[in-house]
Amino acid sequence: MWRLCRNYFYMKIDSLDPRIARANLDSNSQEGELQAMGHFQTYEVFEQKKRGTHHMHVGSVHAPNAELAMLFAKEQYTRRGQCVNIWVVQTSDILVTQYEDADMFENTPSKLHRDPNSYKVMDRIQAYKERQKNKA
Amino acid sequence: MEFTDKHVMGLKDLLYRMADDLLILGHRNSEWTGLGPILEEDIAFSSMAQDKIGQSLALYEILHELGESEPDTVAFTRNAAQFHSCHLVELPIGEYDFSLVRHFFFDHQSALRMDMLVETVVEPLQMVARKFRGEIKYHTMHADLWLKQLANGTEEAKIRMQHSINETFPYALGMFENSLYETELIESGIFPGEAHLKETWLQVVTDKLNAYGYSLPDIDQVIPVNGGRIGLHTEYLQPLLDEMTEVFSIDPSADW
């Protein structure tokens, strides 16, 4: 039962390349149409603009392996603007939820008790700041 | 130490050979734009070609400070015999295996030369060397990864790469043709000299090629293709210059 639920919950994407995703061709097949067309697999690229900030997804690249994906990602996505670090992840290693299950998230905005704004701690924070100031 | 005329001429010669190599190879490599093996590689290779033109501009600017003409004039109005570029950079792009091997040989040379110039006594050149260090680091990473990748590819890939390495090596040695001012450059702390650069370069490319499973021809059996540094060029340079300067020649006073 649990297995069933889990399989329903997520899906794997082979690639964001429309020629692979839309045509629904088997990217693992050693022969056949896809092999004949010779497309590489895709890698998703994440860039970090400043040390300490989050990596953000910026797009994908075709590449025969992760090292070359990294090499291509540098020129595709960081030619302009600041960047200090890149991650590449093979697209097929990413699990995604399905949009038909998006109702899972529907009530989230109304759960205000999970929002730190509703914690009444400002008076304690102020008092702490005051103490630190006096110490100094 | 006080620079004599010979020191200044040596420095200008060094700057011209570097800038001309970068301008010509930048132009050659840009001929792959739109024709690269895959889109991502096309963009990366074109972008590096553009970097080379940018690096040449920075060096022509130093030459301008030393009394030479404006960078545009220097780049677009000289004929082949006035260029100090080596034969390696002027050869046509050929097939991708040759272009990658040339990129590997040239960019390691460029990286090591810039590393040495980080220590030069010529301050503006020191700054240029520092500025482009990171950019050139990517260029050599790019070359290394492709050579490694194709060594582990199909049998055809490996054979073609090894063939290009053998054919290109004599031209690559032409990068290190001595200038007339080696002694002045070395004694003044401007540049440690072409011979020293060649030794360092040979060690780096030999180690890398061996690690990937290629071999380098025996240097004692190879005659370096020299002449470029003194204005003797292959038949390929003048047509390249004619094409590169075509638009400029229509109206040299046009504003861009």
Image: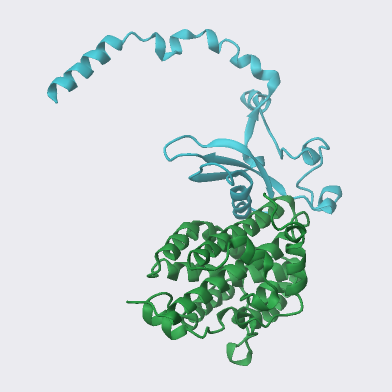
> Chain in cyan?
A
Location of the N terminus of chain A (image quadrant):
top right
Quadrant of the image occupied by residue B153: bottom right
In-image side of A103 versus B32 (left or right): left
Q: Is residue B56 above or below residue A95?
A: below
Residue closer to the observer: A63 or B200: B200
Q: Residue B216 appears at what percent x and percent y? A: 61, 81
Q: Residue A122 appears at what percent x and percent y? A: 30, 11
Chain B rendering hue: green
Q: Is residue A108 above or below residue B14?
A: above
Residue closer to the observer: A119 or A126: A126
Q: Residue B208 appears at what percent x and percent y? A: 55, 72
Q: Residue A77 appears at what percent x and percent y? A: 61, 43
Q: Is residue A112 above or below residue B96?
A: above
In-image side of A98 versus A130 (left or right): right
Location of the C terminus of chain A (image quadrant):
top left
Residue closer to the observer: A114 or B32: B32
Residue occupying the far left of the picture: A135
Which residue is rendered at x = 43% and y = 62% of the image? B124
In-image side of B130 versus B75 (left or right): left
